[in-house]
Amino acid sequence: MSRMKNHEIEKLIERAVEAMKNAYAPYSNFRVGAVVVAKDGSIFTGVNVENASYGLTICAERAAIFKAVSEGVREFDTLVVVADTDSPVSPCGACRQVMAEFGNFRVILANIRGEYIETSVSELLPLGFSGDKLKQGKG
Ligand code: THU
């Protein structure tokens, strides 16, 4: 994992805050924005999208990752997630597992005041389940 400069991280947080405005969160009122930066430099944003059937809600992190994968991009360098929280927002377990599917990459947890924590998928999901043995082909 290459090091990322502070100002680059801050720029990505700004993009995630911008994306956050598109969050569809009429039930919780808790808006989340995410940005995933691929190894090839392409960028995908994501927001949480809630549903009247609560369990169908998708988190911002997974929305961003699924957007990237849908566009043929699977190799990630950095994922940024932001919300209006006192401390930087931390991803749910489901999102951690989805991140781990695509390897170990940098994860920036942030809040809208620009406070952030730099971590990684393997730090967020130590000893996680790996589906390697289940993979039959290239998928
Ligand atoms: N949520 C995310 O989008 N990402 C997180 O890291 C935490 C939770 C969403 C799901 C739901 O729409 C709302 O935040 C409240 O849980």
Image: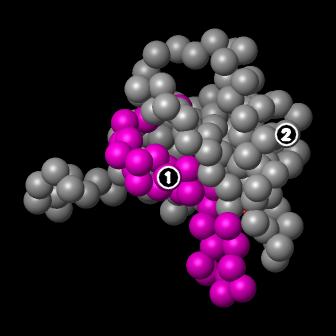
Q: Does the numbered disc 1 mark a residue whose Cβ is under 8 Å from ligand 1?
A: no
Mark 1 lies on residue? 67
SS at circle 2: loop
Q: Is residue 52 above or below residue 1?
A: below
Q: Quadrant of the C terminus?
A: bottom left
Q: CA distance from mark 2 to mark 1?
A: 23 Å
With 31 as the anchor, is 9 left or right in this view? left
Q: Are marks 2 and 1 in contact (CB under 8 Å)?
A: no
Q: Nearer the viewer, residue 15 or 82?
A: 15
Check residue 75 for magenta coloring. Answer: yes
Residue at image point 53% right, 14% down: 3
Q: Quadrant of the N terminus?
A: top left
Outermost residue, left side: 136
Q: Which mark is residue 112?
A: 2
Q: Amino acid at mark 1?
A: Lys
Q: Nearer the viewer, residue 42 or 31?
A: 42
Residue at image point 25% right, 57% down: 131
Q: Quadrant of residue 50?
A: bottom right
Q: Position of residue 71 (x, y in %)?
A: 41, 48
Q: Quadrant of residue 115?
A: top right
Q: Mark 1 Cα within 10 Å, few/some/many (few <14, many 20+)? A: some
With 81 as the anchor, is 61 left or right in this view? left
Q: Looking at the image, can residue 72 be seen?
A: yes
Q: Nearer the viewer, mark 2 or mark 1?
A: 1
Q: Position of residue 29 (x, y in %)?
A: 86, 67
With 124 as the anchor, is 31 left or right in this view? right
Q: Amino acid at mark 2?
A: Ile
Bounds of the magenta span?
A: 49-78
Residue at image point 17% right, 62% down: 134
Q: Quadrant of residue 130?
A: bottom left
Outermost residue, front side: 71
Check residue 128 for magenta coloring. Answer: no
